[in-house]
Amino acid sequence: MDKVAGSKNDEFYTPYYAVKPILKYLKKGATIWCPFDTQDSQFVKSLQMEGYDVIATHIEDGYDFFEYEPNRDSYDYIVSNPPYSLKTEVLERLFELGKPFAMLIGVVGLFESQRRFEMFRDNDWEIMYLNRRVSFMKDFTSGKTALNPPFSSVYITHDILPKQVVFEEIDKKQVLLPV
């Protein structure tokens, strides 16, 4: 199994309402790399609808996040929902890349390993808390959520939010991008 493939329980999709809060913090006209997304992703569709150029790469299309990076000058931000089982490795690589990023990640246990503790201690980062838990989808088209995790999800960001802790509200009725 490729390193980025993670576990079989990692492939859940982010609803539009969980993408929407990060949009207002991204500079208009930017190019955004979505390293864990296909063209069907709500991240990709939402960003494109807002006028961003998007580079969507996914392991199924042969793009291993740990081995591939678009030309450094071709993108401004990295935004996605990474495989849950690889959150530590993903965050480490993101900090190594040094580009602004926003990753939607489960908050439970996020700061509880020595490895992550040191990573967060040694890097500049911000966090966006959402007022409700995100329910993830198992497919792109039904608009039905399939996973209601017993934990909250947060955006861990680097060089995106205006202060270290930001609070945003979500409207869980907007599962799919408005047509």
Image: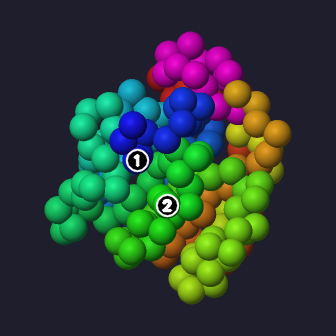
- Looking at the rendering, the stretch of residues picked out in magenta corresponds to 135-146
Q: Quadrant of residue 19?
A: top right
Query: Of helix, strand and loop, which one carries label 1?
Result: helix
Is 29 displayed left or right of 139 in the figure? left
Is 143 displayed left or right of 64 in the figure? right
**Residue 160 part of the magenta-drawn span:** no
Rendered residue at 33%/38% (across/down): 59
Q: In the rendered structure, which disc, 2 or 1, sits on the residue that comes first in sequence?
A: 1
Whether residue 162 is visible to the viewer of this picture, yes or no, is no
Q: Quadrant of residue 97?
A: bottom left
Is 168 displayed left or right of 100 in the figure? right
Q: Return the residue found at the far top.
A: 142
Q: Where is residue 171 in the image (x, y as percent from the top left)?
A: 72, 38
**Residue 140 part of the magenta-drawn span:** yes
Three-letter residue code for mark 1: Lys
Q: Badge 1 is on which residue?
A: 3
Rendered residue at 26%/33% (across/down): 61
Q: Is residue 104 above or below residue 144?
A: below
Q: Is residue 98 above or below residue 68?
A: below
- Measured in 3D between alpha carbons, the distance from the residue under mark 2 to the one under mark 1, in whole angstroms, is 10 Å
Q: Badge 2 is on which residue?
A: 89
Q: Where is residue 41 in the image (x, y as percent from the top left)?
A: 43, 33
Rendered residue at 59%/31% (across/down): 9
Q: In which quarter of the image is residue 138?
A: top right
Is 80 displayed left or right of 40 in the figure? right
Q: Main secondary structure of the magenta part?
A: loop
Labels 2 & 1 near each other (Cβ < 8 A): yes
Three-letter residue code for mark 2: Glu
Q: Position of residue 64 (x, y in %)?
A: 31, 47
Rendered residue at 67%/23% (across/down): 145
